[in-house]
Amino acid sequence: MTIENNLNTIRLSLPDGVQLVAVSKTKSNEEIMEAYRAGQRIFGENKVQELVRKWESLPKDIKWHFIGHLQSNKVRLIAPFIAMVHSVDSLKLLKTINDEAKHAGRVIPCLLQFHIASEESKFGFSPDDAAQMLSVIKLSEYENVTISGVMGMATFTDDVAVINQEFSNLNRIFQNLKEVFFRGNDNFREISMGMSDDYLYAIEKGSTMIRIGSTIFGERKPVTN
């Protein structure tokens, strides 16, 4: 199967309103261009330096999404071009993105990342921490970011019941935030959840944005420096 065939198979499985983020981390420019020629325009990366290199050398109509843990001191490197940050997990990071977006003359869409999995290694807000942050800050003062929704990663497990419970939990978090903090705000609409092994379950639980890598490109290659 080619990358184009893989993309077409996934697209046929997606209902209207679900966006596909092709996770291109560790993939070569040639592999990304194969997906690009097949019509894919949204790509996800999780390493700042790798992302910058790709942005510099690949077509400028690509919408780059940052999907990994983002360090505040590296935001300035991607602020001029990033289309969305999926992984805002602290007020410090949100403030930094706002400041760097202002410096770049842009407004950057952001998703609040929530820790919904059982693995301790995953990042993200708890529902209480996010609610506390949103209660304290004045969103009107963050003119250069748009909080567009939520993101989360399920536990890496074959237990479908666990996966479904975690995706349902993220949907509830989204609905609660929408009701309390973003009522009437049409920008707050995205639920980014679901990857190669679990995206069909995520869609059933309300995902609007899936992040697919290995099902498109094949298994990840190790990064070499």
Image: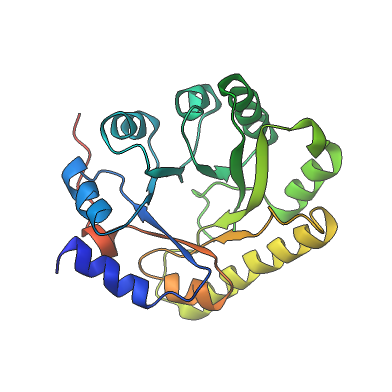
Q: Residue at x 24, y 68 (%)?
A: 6
Q: Which residue is drawn at 16% across and 45% down?
A: 30
Task: Give the image quarter of residue 52.
Answer: top left
- State the count of labels: 0
Q: Residue at x 51, y 30 (%)?
A: 71
| Rendered view: 173 above or below 25 | below
The percent coordinates of residue 155 (x first, y second) are 48, 64
Q: Residue at x 58, y 69 (%)?
A: 166
Q: Is residue 169 left or right of residue 41?
A: right
| Rendered view: 134 above or below 72 | below
The percent coordinates of residue 15 (x first, y second) are 48, 76
Q: Which residue lies furthest to the top in this view?
A: 103
**Between 20 and 96, the one nearer to me in the picture:** 20
The percent coordinates of residue 189 (x first, y second) are 65, 59
* Quadrant in which the N terminus is drawn: bottom left
**Between 165 and 40, the one nearer to me in the picture:** 40
Q: How is the image coloured?
A: rainbow
**Between 210 and 93, the one nearer to me in the picture:** 210
**Between 205 and 165, the one nearer to me in the picture:** 205
* Quadrant in which the C terminus is drawn: top left
The percent coordinates of residue 110 (x first, y second) are 60, 44
Task: Give the image quarter of residue 64.
Answer: top left
Q: In this view, does 181 lie to the left or right of 219?
A: right
